[in-house]
Amino acid sequence: MGRTTNGELLDAAGALNGQLEDRGFEKLDEVTVLKHAENMWKDAQEGKLEHWVGREVVARIRGSAINHLCRLDRKSVPTL
């Protein structure tokens, strides 16, 4: 993970959430953003996150999330 503190992760999550409206999506409520960021931070601290570059994975994701990801401009999204 490129970020080194929980605060930086929360800042990045808030920034990404703030960009949703600019892209035609409804922003998530702050509680949801905090919950997901805290879960991600906990998983990172417990060593549960891995870089999966070049490896296959099976995941469940909603179609709306896939549509959203397809419309993101990778040049304007902060790295985590």
Image: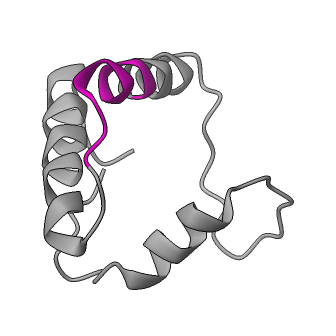
Which of 18/24 is in front?
24
Q: Residue at x 70, y 55 (%)?
A: 61
Which of 59/3 is in front?
59
Q: Residue at x 18, y 61 (%)?
A: 21
Numbered label tally: 0
Q: Is residue 11 above or below residue 45?
A: below
Task: Specify whether 1 is left or right of 58.
Answer: left
| Quarter of the rendering containing residue 19 | bottom left
Residue 29 lies within the magenta run: yes
The percent coordinates of residue 34 (x first, y second) are 31, 21
| Quarter of the rendering containing residue 48 | top right
The secondary structure making up most of the magenta span is helix
The percent coordinates of residue 58 (x first, y second) are 86, 59
Q: Residue at x 21, y 83 (%)?
A: 75
Q: Is residue 72 above or below residue 40?
A: below
Task: Specify whether 48 is left or right of 18.
Answer: right
The percent coordinates of residue 17 (x first, y second) are 23, 47
Please give the range of residues in magenta.
Answer: 27-36
